[in-house]
Every structure is written in C-alpha cells, then in structure tokens.
Amino acid sequence: MSSKPRRRRSAGREARRAARQKMPTSTAAFIDRKIPYVELVSEETLELIENNAEIVLEEIGIEFNDFPQALELFKEAGADIDGERVRFPRGMCRSIVQASAPAEFVQHARNPARNVIIGGDRTVLVPAYGSPFIRNLDEGRRYATIDDFQNFVKLAYLSPGMHHSGGTICEPVDIPVNKRHFDMVYSHIKYSDKPFMGSVTAPERAQDSVDMAKIVFGDDFVEQNTVITSLINANSPMTFDATMLGAATVYAEHNQATMISPFLIAGAMSPVTVVGTVTQILAEALAGMAYVQLVRPGAPVIFGTFAAAVSMQTGAPTFGTPEPSLIVYAAAALARRLGVPFRSGGGLCGSKIPDAQAAYESANTMTSAALAGVNFMLHAAGWLEGGLAMGYEKFVMDADQASMIAILLQGVDASENGQAMDALREVGPGSHFLGSEHTQANFETAFYRSPLADNNSFEQWEQEGSQDIVQRANSTWKSMLNEYEAPPLDPAIDEALLAFMEKRKSEFADRNY
Amino acid sequence: MSSKPRRRRSAGREARRAARQKMPTSTAAFIDRKIPYVELVSEETLELIENNAEIVLEEIGIEFNDFPQALELFKEAGADIDGERVRFPRGMCRSIVQASAPAEFVQHARNPARNVIIGGDRTVLVPAYGSPFIRNLDEGRRYATIDDFQNFVKLAYLSPGMHHSGGTICEPVDIPVNKRHFDMVYSHIKYSDKPFMGSVTAPERAQDSVDMAKIVFGDDFVEQNTVITSLINANSPMTFDATMLGAATVYAEHNQATMISPFLIAGAMSPVTVVGTVTQILAEALAGMAYVQLVRPGAPVIFGTFAAAVSMQTGAPTFGTPEPSLIVYAAAALARRLGVPFRSGGGLCGSKIPDAQAAYESANTMTSAALAGVNFMLHAAGWLEGGLAMGYEKFVMDADQASMIAILLQGVDASENGQAMDALREVGPGSHFLGSEHTQANFETAFYRSPLADNNSFEQWEQEGSQDIVQRANSTWKSMLNEYEAPPLDPAIDEALLAFMEKRKSEFADRNY
C-alpha cells in the first residue's frame, strides 16, 4: 500500500451518517446498455445447443398437463400429440416464435416517465420475488405480511437502482391465499409508480390483475399496450402445468407480457452439465413461447431462465457458482439469436443471512446476468436463502449494487472531458489532482458513491461504532421508509380499485390454497 | 420459488462440517483461459488513449527522481532530459518495449509442477500484498508478525485457487525493516513450493532476494530463467522514485521479472475520469517498462495497474465500484495491444471486516480482473481495509472464490458428455435427473463445491449454530494450518539459506526504516 491522499476535513459523525443514508432519487427508468454483450460461448456451441434443443422438441417432446387448449392449438399448428406429450416437427416452435413475438416492447407504468423498454440493449432491474419469509436485523426471520410487502414496494420505489416494482416481492401470508393477489397488485399501484407484475397462481387471479390494470390505464389502453409482466415457470423437466398455462393464456389474450421461465436446479431438474441444461432450457422456453404466440400472435413474451446448481452432497440448490453463470451467458446469447427479450436472475444466494456468502453469491449472479445481457433481471434485490426469505438489509445492499451495474453497462466516456488531457497538463508529475479545475468540475458525478460502503479510516470506523454493512443498511432502510412519500394517485382511481377489490373479495370465501 | 429436490440423507453435523472444511488439494498450476477476453472498451477509444498517452510522454514527460542511471539510459536512447523530467519522442517507449519485452514467460517454482506461465491466455492468482496488520475472528486487528506471514504462506500453499505464494503477504513487523526481507523470502521457499515475489524496498534487498533464489535454483539457472517476480510501483502521477527504480534495475539485470505498476487512486493521483486515468497509467507503464528494457533487453516485464477511486467526500480510496473496473478492462486491452503480460488486483475492498461490503467489493474486483484478462492477479486473497489488513477468514473466503473463477474461465464443455442428450432421453418430462446414469457418472466434478458456503435448509443451519461464513472460515483456516505439511526441501539448501541469512544479517545493524 502506497501513500493515500490526505483526508478532507469532514463535518462530523452525524453529517457523514446523514450523507450516507441519503439515497439519490433521480434515475433513468431503465439501463440503455452501451457496452458490448459478453459472449462466453462460441457460435459453434450455440448452434449445437439449438440443434440439440430441436431434437428434444422433436423426439422427446414437452408435456402440457391438464390443459387441453394447449394440445388443441399445437395440434392445429402441426405438432404430434400423444396423450399430454407434444412433439414438435423440427423448427416449428422457433418459426412460430420468430413469426410474431416482438423483439422488444414497452411496459407502461402509471407514471409514463417510469415506462421501461424490455428487450434489445435495455436492462431492467427488478426486486426479488416469491419469499414466504422476511428477515431483518431487528426481528430475524418471520413470515411476511402485507405490511412487509408494502415496505418493499416503497423501498423499490425509492431505489434508483430498481426500475420495476416487481411482483410477489414477498408472500403476504396474513391474507388468504386466494385473495392476496388483490392486495399485492393494489400495493404496487398505490405505493409506487413503477411498472409491476401480475398474479400467476390461477387464471382468475391473472384476470383480476388485468382488470385492476384496466381501472388504472383504461380498457382500450390495456388491450393495445403492455402494462403487466408475469412470471410463467415451466415445471422442469419438459413440463408445463395447468396453473401456469392458464395464467399465461389470460395475459396473452389481453396483450400482456409473459416470461416463460424454465425454473431448474441443474443436476436435479436438468442434466448435470451446462450445455445439457441450456439445451433443455431452450427447448422448454421455445415450446412455452410458441404456445403464447398461438394464443395471440404478437403478445409480448420473454425467454426466461432460472438456474441454480444442485449440491450433490445435500440436494440443496447452490448459487453464485460458475456453472449457473455459464448457463446464463449461454441462454442470453440464445435469446438474442432467437430475437426475443431475455430474463434471468441476479442477486441470488443460498445464505440465510446477509453475510459475505450472500454478498459474494449475489455479486457473482448480478454481474454475470448484467454482462450476459439480461433484459429483465428478476430477484435483483432482497433475495436470501434460495428465495425463501426477503431481507430488508439485503434489499438496500443489493439496490446499491444495482446502481453500480447501471454505470458499468454505460462503459467509458471518451469525450474531451472524459479524456482529461487538460487535467494531466495542469497537474503534471508529482502533484495531485484533487484541487485541479477538471476534478472540481466533475467530482459530483465522477465516481459512484455508495450510500452503504464504509471507506473511512479504521480509526474513524471504530469511533463510529465498528458497524458492519448490515447495521448501516438497517439504518438506511428505516430512514428511507420514514421519509417515503407516496407518488400521487388520482383519488377516483384509488376508490375504484378499492371498490373492485371489495366486490371481488365478497364473491368467494377465503381459502388458503 | 418452486419446489426443491428432496434432500438426501446426510451423515450428521460432524461429517458435514468435516466435508466442508476439507479443501481439495490437487489443482492446475495456473488457469489456461478458454473463454474470450471481455472487451468493454471500443478499439477506437483504445487508439485514442494510446495517442493521448504518447502526448503525455512527449509533452508532459515522466520524472525519474534521484536516479541518474535512468536519465542516462533514456538520453542515450533519444529522449529529451530536462532536470529529472524525461520527455519521450512519440512512439519511443512503445518501440523499445515491443522490440524486446517477452509476450509471456515462465516463472519457475522450486517444484516444477508449480511453474506458472505469465502472459497470453494464462491467469495466475496471487495472495494480497503489503498489509501491516492482520485480522482474524479471535484476535481482531493487530500488527502482523513473521508467524502470520508463514501462516499465510501455508494457507496459499494449501489453496488450490492460489497459484503463487505472493510477496509481502503481510509485513512481519516483529523483524527489523531492513532485515525482514530475508525471513519473508526464506518463508516462501521453506513453507511453499509455489513461485514467489522478491523484495523491492531497497536495491540491496532485491539483490539478497536474487542471491537466495540462486541458492535454491543455482546461479546459472537464475541468470537464464525467471524465478522471481517483483512489484515496482510508479509514484503516480508520472513519477518513479529511486527505491523502486533501484530494485527494478537489480531484477532486470538478473533476468527476473518486474511489474511496472502505476498505483493510483483516481481523482487524487490521476484525473477523475476513466479515460484520463487509463491514459496516465499507459504513459507511466510504458516509461517504466522501457526503462527495464534499456537495462536488459528481453527481461520479463509486466504492465501493472492498481486503481481505486477516491471518495470525493472523504478522500479515502473506494473499491469494487464500476469506474475502477472499467479502468482495468481498458488497461488489460491496452496491454494486449502492446503485447506484454498484464497485472491488476482482484479481491480488493475498503471494508475493515469480512462482511458483505468486503464480499461485494471483492467479487466485483475479482470478476472484472478475471474477465478483462489479467495475467497476474495480485491481492486475490486476504485483502481488507484498502490493503492495510490481511484477513485470515477473508483469505480462505477469497481463495474459494478464486477456485470458482478458474472454472468460469474454462467456459463450457460441448463434448458429447457435456451435451447430455442421453440423460435428457433417459429422464424425459416430469421426472428428475438425480439418479440418472449421466448424473451418477459426472456428479463428483460437475459443479463447484464451495467448502465455505452453507446451502442447507434454514432449520439445519440453525441447528448447526446459525453460523455466518466468517465463523465457518475461522474453522477452515485453523484446520488447514493444523493439517499443513511442508513440501520437502533439500536439507542442504535449507542450511545454505539459513547460513546466508545469518551471515548477511550480521553484516549490518538493525534499522526500522
């Protein structure tokens, strides 16, 4: 370690803490990538995978369980139907998808400034999805409630690194299973103006999501534009079930977006190799996306991939290891070759707590997803414990990393100001740049400032209580929630949403499945 | 979160802990990269930087302080000398470097199986360097001693992710400054058989390092081969000092390798922009490498870069943020264009402790360095607190990440086994792959197994004491040191080394500078 620059006089502990806790609020609605895609898999291997996926579709086939509508549509389109097993002539799924699926689309937010473009060179970072539990430093781990759900909607709204409000950020287990989708969709609309995801746990819940969106955006607007994305997991290996297909059908019929996502733990739900797993992913995604295009040609569809690696010792999923990263690099490249947007996960980890394991794994998954060219990065903030818990501290820590990813994807500024030749001439050998004109003109925006990282001297850090990042993150999310102000919502729309929910909830009994 | 595979019956807490603590011991001597370099900066911008660096060298120049030999050599080679400022005609440094610097070279280890190739498609991961303090969970932070130094040499020896024993892994402050280099070099030789770095804090200490290497390898072998690498920092901006130049001269004269490393905190010791900083780095590295080639044409030289970003609030260096990553991507590409090996840092962080901040930052820096194509990755394990402390737990955590990087850089296996078509045919829709023939044949090596990550269920993790990764890492490094066995060393060589040290140490008084 060589000498460090002299520390500037600082305004004391409280001012520093305040500065640290203040998250920047202005942000781009999404990332418009300026760097090349990172291609770690050769074209030859990608072609091999495409060929093998066609063999899977043609010889092995995909099952569509308890959902005759899919069998009928595929039969009409020329597939071979054997019970619930569908076998596709070579190239059939690919040509159906390429004939009508859009390469990119706008997902509208209720605040048009928050609209996101999904596909092409864009990256949209989205909170984690689906945890029954939450964790924070004060309470440890417990079941999530609708209050937690709303807290995370607010934190995502306030986080410049998050471009989307997400979907089932955590399961509000204090509300009956068959009614909680109303409260989730309402919370996304009420407490944020970023775009959101709809319910997929039953076709009628998907329909309720669409109907609530129509109250906000208007009937015609929803039929002609995309205002909801939805997560349709394949039941890997090579199976789709009626619940997911039913929800996908509703969204597609209304021109809303579906993410067809093989969800698998490689070695358990797919082969134990990268190329074998990606082959299966491509086959499953092609079949699912083809189904959506048969329901409504042109409906936005996203090629999804969720891949962990199984621990051969325990059977548990593992995250942040190199093989699933390679799976994401390969799958992203295949989606580009196919010409559809790509979704995968970042910020994933197996750790139960927001410790260094969580951070290594989350950074590894987020970086691979970003460099690979993921367009819709689900789980980018908050994920713990293989998705079983949503962490408050983890959320703000990941959101900080998400803001950094946005800068990385912008690449370098080669303008005259970026070249800084005047600064080099002004300062010359043996001096320092802190006071130079160029530094003064650029220092506000030159380098990313993390609101959570502590880079002070050891002595100062000790004097401030030897806090780890989780303790600082704990203060940060609390002060964010304290300072939160809801984005304005037309009171007539708010009332209409509440009336709709009340009416619909009264139409059937509570049920916890 | 969808359903998980069933957990296998496990052999209980102790067996699991033992399995986790057992680090694999066989490993490749270095990484032979199979994936493409990740190029985030356009050729046009790289050319612009090269052009601007020539302007810096020609118009501003570089200072060589208190070292007339450099001024004389540069004058003879055609540079313009103004006091200690050297201005280089356009292209002069580049052509000197390209005329004789090798594109890659072998650094020999005393165990030939541990020889590393530095340059080309190879990546060599090396422990952190230069900390006066150590940190561990038991003792907190304290000054380092020679015992710590030896412990880290042993840990690096036992870590398959580390290809090199490093240099000043930590400062043994219990030994006088002017004699500790003997003990450091001896410890590298005695407790490891991986290659190592020599002293650079004075020319005579560099000479002692060479002389000790000659005892191990033989005089002629050392003069004809490279057995030492050395870290020569520029005193940025645009200055080299006599200490570093003196050490570089000794190593070059003996055909040993020097890493010419601009060491800077961008915004303080270089401009506050990425392109401006890289321009300065290239100019400094070109001048330093040209000096080495003038001393001895053909002496191995490495283009080095150490870049952090200054915190504009406090003046402190910050790590793991996107701008220094972009600096490394650019500098690595420039080194490739120049045709010399490239060195940068990975595993860097500003955190005082091995918390999530440390891990996010370390993962970010290690991944960028690896993808960018760093050939010699210093600081890849152990670094805390901007390099002021070497962490025991951090070391084994980083070494685990280093093992994963090795797999990532191998890319995907597209062989018939990798394609796994038989597995897909055998299993088919709706079943699972755990018991398939292909899985059974591959599961031992299919996915990286972290010895530190906990991926068990929440309940099992809680039952095992709710440990964070630092607590597990604490057990790991202790059991590694317990089980350590020194690699065999010819007793005659050992005695000769000890005799040399004793004699040399008796020739001058202790001094603490």
Image (spheres, coloured by chain):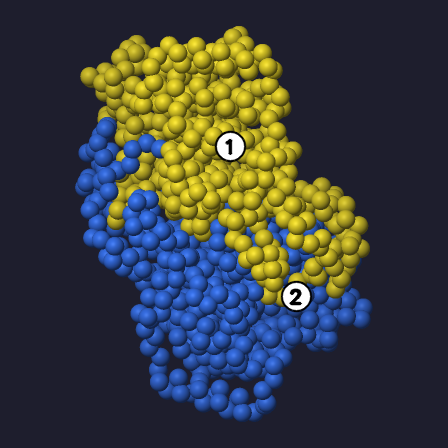
Chain colours: A blue, B yellow
Q: Chain of mark 1?
A: B
Q: Residue at the location (54% across, 92% down)?
A: A506
The x and y percentages for residue A501 are 49, 86
Quick check: A403 above or below A297?
Answer: above
Amino acid under label 1? Answer: Asn
The x and y percentages for residue A158 are 36, 66
Q: Nearer the viewer, residue B366 or B478?
A: B478
Q: Chain of mark 2?
A: B
The answer to whether A452 appears left or right of B222 in the picture is left
The answer to whether A176 appears left or right of A439 in the picture is right
Report which residue position mark 2 lands on: B3
The x and y percentages for residue A462 are 33, 49
Amino acid under label 2? Answer: Ser
Question: How many angstroms separate mark 1 from mark 2 (CA)?
Answer: 44 Å
Q: Nearer the viewer, residue A13 or B77?
A: A13
Report which residue position mark 1 lands on: B151
N-term-proximal mark, 1 vs 2: 2
Q: Is residue B440 visible?
A: yes
Q: Residue at the location (44% across, 19% down)?
A: B182
Q: Label 1 crowding class (10 Å Cα cut-off): few <14, some 14-19, many 20+?
A: many
Res B283 quadrant in image: top left
Q: Residue at the location (71% across, 65% down)?
A: A239
Q: Nearer the viewer, residue A38 or B375?
A: B375
Tell me the quarter of the image containing the N terminus of chain A. top left
